[in-house]
Image: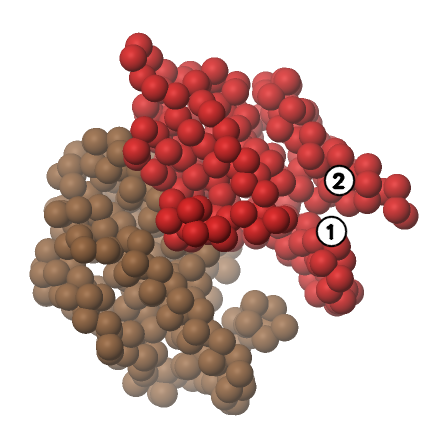
């Protein structure tokens, strides 16, 4: 198989690539990696991806020593072109396409970090350091996430069934995996947000409930998994945690 | 393009992505009108502007009723709807993927870290906020990490970030990396590889680059005169 995809389904961008590839029957060699085992820091993975992030792909002749494409957005855009997936994922109509790009751009510094933070704050940091996050910090993080979700509903959803219109696109896929992350941490983001919940149900139905749930297994069991996790596994994340979250 | 009306853009040239957009429009001779939104005067928070863009940010594109935000989405839209040279946003999937890879990474790397240095060194003092040396050191360290990645990954084997020719990636990156210059700080001064890259980008963009960056040069004058 010439297409290899390196994934850890605990990670949101990995889930979107996994769902996209499976939904579109794209044949690939599923290379499972575990970010918690620190695999992304290994020399082996460093050869594949200097950015040391997941997901990553290696597509036959699209492989050069260090230039395997990483980052889920670029990967999925590449796959839409290469495998001629249905138009609605990334429409040929340039104005609709621009709307997809607009969401994909905006979410980098909003939904993605705010959703991600909840997993760290509620589960992973307490596990790694044995202490809870101070109330004020937690409240601010929740407020940030809520603001982003408000903007998401007001600007990107409005009265439409999906972000770009009547059909699901990459924007919805990227959005849903990020919004599910805090859910895994025990935060019900859909409570008191009927519009968001209706959108989520629609997206899950479009993707296919089975595929959606399969991709989100790691998230559904996150609370339990973290309970039984050996704190040693998070050891190598500590410097990053201190740097990004606790400074 | 025959019969196509000019686009309207809402900009503040103090904003890095606004500069990237203006340079692209001018360099490619895309007919456009500019409405200046002065961020320092809070003009992005007026009811009219908020109606246009609830995010209260610039740049905004209005293509005859089609309103679009987010500079990379805007640049990609213009690159694909106008007849610009292919190298800006190549059609070939493998080449285009490289530009998409950079523009995604850009948000929380180049943009975030260069911006933070600028905000802490120029804007916060201007607004009378107390400085925090430890935070500033951290901001510089984060930016250095980003510059290392630019040199070691994106510029490892090619003259521009994503290929042998300039693309949207270089345009977005260079505007961010020019921002700390407002305080007179040249973050590239000890990095010959990045300096060469910046020179190459500036040459490729010629007049439109300096015109767009005049506000940066002006702020630098004022800032360094104070010292």
Front in this rendered view, residue A62 or A185: A185
**Front-lying residue, B84 or A119:** B84
Give the quadrant of the N terminus of chain B: top left
The answer to whether mark 2 and mark 1 are in CB contact below 8 A is yes
Q: In the rendered image of this protein, does residue A184 appear above or below residue A176?
A: below
Q: Residue at x 40, y 67 (%)?
A: A147
The red chain is B
Tell whether A207 sits left or right of A58. Answer: left
Q: Is residue B25 among the parts visible in the rendering?
A: yes
Find numbered disc 1 in the image and state the secondary structure of the residue it sits on: helix
From the viewer's side, name the closer residue of B71 and B99: B71
Spot occupied by residue A3 in the image (x, y as percentages of width and height): 26, 42
- Chain on which label 1 sits: B
From the rendered image, report the letter of the chain displayed in brown.
Answer: A
* Residue denoted by label 2: B219
Q: Residue at x 30, y 58 (%)?
A: A154
Q: Which residue is mark 1?
A: B122
Percent x, y for residue A164?
A: 22, 46
Q: Quadrant of residue B23?
A: top right
């Amino acid at each position: 198989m010439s297409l290899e995809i390196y994934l850890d389904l605990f990670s949101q961008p990995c889930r979107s690539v996994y769902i996209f590839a499976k939904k579109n029957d794209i044949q690939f060699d599923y290379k499972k990696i575990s970010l918690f085992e620190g695999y992304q820091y290994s020399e082996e993975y460093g050869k594949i991806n200097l950015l040391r992030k997941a997901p990553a792909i290696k597509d036959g002749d699209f492989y050069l020593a260090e230039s395997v494409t990483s980052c889920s957005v670029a990967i999925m855009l590449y796959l839409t072109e290469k495998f001629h997936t249905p138009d609605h994922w990334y429409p040929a109509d340039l104005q609709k396409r621009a709307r997809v790009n607009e969401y994909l751009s905006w979410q980098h510094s909003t939904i993605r970090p705010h959703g991600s933070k909840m997993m760290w704050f509620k589960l992973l940091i307490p596990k790694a350091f044995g202490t809870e996050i101070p109330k004020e910090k937690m409240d601010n993080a929740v407020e940030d996430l809520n603001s982003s979700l408000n903007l998401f509903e007001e600007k990107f959803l409005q009265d439409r069934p999906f972000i770009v219109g009547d059909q699901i696109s990459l924007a919805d896929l990227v959005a849903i995996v990020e919004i599910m992350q805090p859910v895994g941490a025990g935060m019900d983001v859909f409570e008191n947000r009927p519009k968001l919940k209706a959108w989520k149900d629609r997206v899950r139905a479009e993707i296919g409930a089975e595929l959606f749930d399969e991709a989100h297994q790691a998230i559904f069991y996150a609370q339990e998994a973290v309970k039984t996790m050996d704190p040693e596994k998070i050891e190598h994340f500590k410097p990053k945690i201190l740097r990004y979250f606790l400074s | 393009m025959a019969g196509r009306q000019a686009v309207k853009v809402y900009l503040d040239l103090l904003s890095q992505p606004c500069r990237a957009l203006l340079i692209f429009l001018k360099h490619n001779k895309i007919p456009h009108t500019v409405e200046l939104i002065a961020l320092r005067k809070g003009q992005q928070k007026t009811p009219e502007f908020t109606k246009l863009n609830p995010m209260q940010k610039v740049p905004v594109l209005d293509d005859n009723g089609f309103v679009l935000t987010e500079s990379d989405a805007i640049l990609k839209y213009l690159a694909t709807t106008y007849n610009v040279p292919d190298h800006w946003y190549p059609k070939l999937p493998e080449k285009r993927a490289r530009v998409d890879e950079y523009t995604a990474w850009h948000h929380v790397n180049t943009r975030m870290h260069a911006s933070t240095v600028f905000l802490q060194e120029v804007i916060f003092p201007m607004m009378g906020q107390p400085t925090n040396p430890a935070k500033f050191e951290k901001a510089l360290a984060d930016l250095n990490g980003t510059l290392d990645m630019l040199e070691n990954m994106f510029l490892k084997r090619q003259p521009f970030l994503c290929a042998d020719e300039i693309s949207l990636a270089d345009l977005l990156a260079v505007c961010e990396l020019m921002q700390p210059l407002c305080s007179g700080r040249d973050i590239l001064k000890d990095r010959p590889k990045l300096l060469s890259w910046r020179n190459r980008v500036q040459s490729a963009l010629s007049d439109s680059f300096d015109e767009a960056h005049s506000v940066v040069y002006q702020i630098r004058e004022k800032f360094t005169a104070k010292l």
